[in-house]
Amino acid sequence: MDLRVAVGDGVHLRVRRHEGAREPSFLLVHGLASNALLWDEVAAELSRAGYASYAVDLRGHGESDLPEGGFDSGTVAADLAAVAMALDLDDLVVVGQSWGGNVVVRLAAEHPALVRALALVDGGWSDLSEEFASWEECEAALRPPEVDGLRAEEMRLYLRGAHPDWSPVAIEATIANLRAAPDGTLVRRLPIPEHMKIVRDMWDDPPLRFYPALAMPVLLVPAMPRQPGRAARTRARVEAAARLLVRAMIREYRDGDHDLHAQQPQRLAADLLELA
């Protein structure tokens, strides 16, 4: 079931609810330029186990409103707190992927009563100012490619080739990061200027400063690169982050995609159920 929830300043977010009667419920938060549909297969597994979940399209993403501002982690975390209040949710297992990990770290630090446990899926621990020598280098590396004007079938063929182990559900959910224009071509839902505002906020305000406030269990789920050198650097960053936490667990996904929720939804759901 899709809901529309007001979070202030006239902004409404789409929330996808999957049914379940057991406690706790799950709050599922996508990454940059993604959308809530990427969580559908994970949510289906959680629902089969009896747990409700709420996957949110963050502002400017998916079917949520695209306001003029508020593309910083503080505002987006406040949006999630407003969703929880509107839907009378608390004591949640909160899951954030990629940039969504940054957002849920801040949510958990500033609204700890909402969060029973936290899962960070290949995100929530990076400091871009340590990964790049300058903002200009970071900006050039992380500016997204121009994809406006492609047709859905072109995008579908590309994604099938790039991710042969993804299901058709995950492929279609990724295509939904764009919307169809009247002429049948695709257009980004999150425009590049807003995308880069989020990247700049990630540069200016990395999440590690909030880690000392996280008293709840935190599961860190890195997608480990195939290359040994890159895997070692990822492991070092994740282990350093875990040392800042009171109750940290690490679950590595070797040869994992950044979008683990798309690539391995059943395994990820099993790990989230164990955390719950």
Image (cartoon, rainbow, N blue to C red):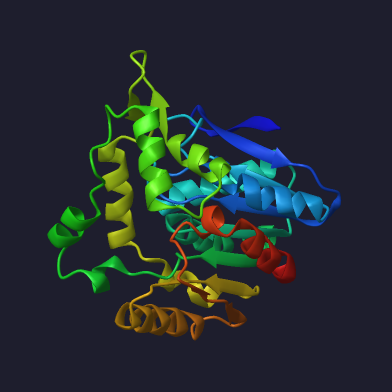
User: Is residue 214 visible in the rendered structure shown here?
Assistant: no
Residue lying at 81% horizontally and 56% vertically, measured from the top left: 49
Is residue 241 shown left or right of residue 109? Answer: left
Figure quadrant of residue 68: top left
Residue lying at 23% horizontally and 49% vertically, measured from the top left: 143
Is residue 153 shown left or right of residue 133? Answer: right
Is residue 167 shown left or right of residue 44? Answer: left
User: Is residue 229 visible in the rendered structure shown here?
Assistant: yes
Quadrant where the image shows the C terminus: bottom right
Classify 127 as above or below 137: below
Is 70 or 260 nearer to us in this picture? 260
Is 58 or 255 nearer to us in this picture? 255
* Picture mark count: 0
Is 59 or 182 nearer to us in this picture? 182
**Residue 243 horizontal/vertical position (percent):** 49, 86
**Residue 254 horizontal/vertical position (percent):** 48, 74
Is residue 42 shown left or right of residue 256? Answer: right
Classify 79 as above or below 91: above
Figure quadrant of residue 115: bottom right
Residue lying at 53% horizontally and 70% vertically, measured from the top left: 221
Quadrant where the image shows the N terminus: top right
Residue lying at 55% horizontally and 42% vertically, measured from the top left: 168
**Residue 113 horizontal/vertical position (percent):** 69, 61
**Residue 179 horizontal/vertical position (percent):** 41, 27
Q: Residue pushed farthest top? A: 182
